[in-house]
Image (tube, helix red, strand yellow):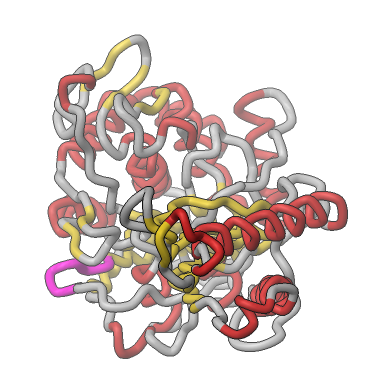
Amino acid sequence: MSDLILRMVEESKEEYLRFLIEIVSADTCIKDMGIYGKEINGQKIIIDKLKEIGAELDIFEPNYEDISKYKEVNPFHEYIGRPNVVGILKGSGGGKSLIINGHIDVMPFDHLDEWICYPLEPIVKNGKLYGRGTCDMKGGLAAAIMALKTIKESGLELKGDVILQSVVDEEGGGNGTLACCEKGYKADAAIIPEPTQLKLAPAHMGWLFYRIEFKGKTAHCALKWKGTNAIEKCMKAMLAMQELERNWAIEKRHPYLPSPTINFGTIHGGIEGSIVPDKCILEMSAHFLPTCEIDGEWMGSKVEKEFMHAFENIINSDDWLKENPPKVTLYQLGSGYDIGSSHPIYQCVSQNFKKIKGKEPLLYGLESGADARLLNNYANTPTLIFGPGNIENAHSINEFIDLEQYYDAIKILSLSIVDWCNS
């Protein structure tokens, strides 16, 4: 069985490349961080290919009213003409089910004079395919679909169902996958072929994004003591939060994820150098380790409470802040997750990686987030992140994917789907 699939992959590389070029050429950029998007251009190609494979199709637009009950929802995104595409390959029965989830949306692009090609007209150079979305994550999505096509054409029968989800608006926060969870899609396991350089990632960090508005009292700069400097109050809070970050680095450790971090992204305050500023706005993020403890509405609620407790201590240490508490707005959040390297889906993909590459795969945890948390935490589907491409060049000028990784991903995914669904 393995030899048949591997031979078919070797003989079909040109076809696999053509399919990847086709979907990279489709403009599926989001706009305004996912409020709008052009995913339909790529979804039409996915629909045609899934029909060719013989999958049962479920094509639906995310319904904000249905998913608004989840705290991790990203509000007020428009989904008319932006459908999810789910293709189901029914098994004969008696095997494990598998979701393969990938997003068709990509980030916008600019600085066209610095690209080696127009981002939607991909080119091959030195064994790499350049173009927007090649790495994040049309390469992984194409590899998964080509793996299913290979299995279908090999004549091998699967016992368990395979559910291929091509979702919208992952870059805008994950509402497409959340809509799949709400619709009831779940399985014994899932694979998300986000770019990991074929490392196996059973975990990723969670995150909190805050906007904090500090009040002050305006005055002439020469009479500074008659006012209250909002920027300085913000700085005091920032120093205290840096101390919190240092404590987290000491206290919170993980075998394959970094320690939690706090990042100050933007700061806006004041109108002139000669005026004591009466307003300062800080936008910041905190990335945290996954937790299985639910203490509220979502998997990161305990961390959220811990952060807010620390911030309240900052306020209570300053008479002005106590009397004029800053306005804190949590404007984006995402839970972490971790299934561990002993989980059967990790072991299944690991064994097939060794068959293809002749060595042990690297265990890895994503510092950033992905839709894996949604499948794992809300659809009760243990999820592994594994795919071609290097996340370091995702969203970048001259984004590319190494084609050897792309073909290897097709081989490993093909073997893993067969092994998992027939076990």
In the rendered image, which quarter is residue 293 located in? bottom right
As drawn, 158 above or below 305: above
As drawn, 240 above or below 309: above
Residue 163 makes an appearance in the image: no
Position in image of residue 21 (x %, y %): 22, 32
Asked whether 243 or 69 is in front, the reply is 243
Q: Residue at x 59, y 87 (%)?
A: 297
Q: Residue at x 32, y 35 (%)?
A: 134
Q: Residue at x 46, y 57 (%)?
A: 100
Asked whether 360 or 203 is in front, the reply is 203
As drawn, 349 above or below 129: below
Q: Residue at x 78, y 50 (%)?
A: 246
Task: Locate the N terminus by quadrant.
Answer: top right
As drawn, 71 above or below 347: below
Position in image of residue 66 (x %, y %): 34, 89
- On the picture, is 196 further left or further right than 249? left
Range drawn in magenta: 79-84
Residue 372 highlighted magenta (yes or no)? no
Secondary structure, magenta segment, majority class: loop
Task: Locate the C terminus by quadrant.
Answer: bottom right
Position in image of residue 197 (x %, y %): 54, 32
- On the picture, is 289 further left or further right than 38? right
